Amino acid sequence: MKIEVDYERCEGHGMCEAVAPALFSLDDDDQLTYHAEGADVPDEGLAAARTAIASCPVAALRQIDGGRGA
């Protein structure tokens, strides 16, 4: 599974970082960094990734099916 991030939509609420800190972080200006950009989410992060997608209040995260763990 891959995740697509709509950086224009992201408002820096930090819900994704709270549930999946290995995958997402916000800098001091609340700008999101997605640490698995362009890669499959590691198997150990799949549950947290799905929770992060579901928890985003502005729907800035989207699951892209394909690859392992889809």
Image (cartoon, rainbow, N blue to C red):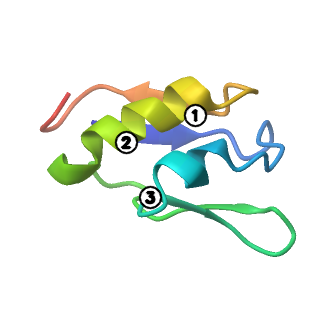
Residues at badges 3 and 2 in contact (C-beta under 8 Å)?
yes
**Residue at 51%, 39% in the rendered image:** 4
Provide residue 62's location: percent of width, then percent of height.
Answer: 51, 28
The residue lying toward the viewer, choosing from 3 and 23, is: 23
Provide residue 47's location: percent of width, then percent of height.
Answer: 30, 36
Asked if residue 62 lies left or right of residue 46, the reply is: right
Q: Amino acid at mark 3?
A: Leu
Q: Amino acid at mark 1?
A: Leu
Q: Amino acid at mark 2?
A: Ala
Badge 1 density bin: few <14, some 14–19, many ≥20, Cα 10 Å: many
Provide residue 10's location: percent of width, then percent of height.
Answer: 77, 42
Q: Where is mark 3, residue-wise?
A: 23
| Mark closer to the observer (3, 2) | 2
The correct choice, above or below, for 39 with respect to 27 in the image is above
Residue at disc 1, secondary structure: strand
Marked residue nearer the N-terminal end (3 or 2) = 3
Marked residue nearer the N-terminal end (1 or 2) = 2
Q: Where is mark 1, residue-wise?
A: 61
**Residue at 58%, 54% in the rendered image:** 17
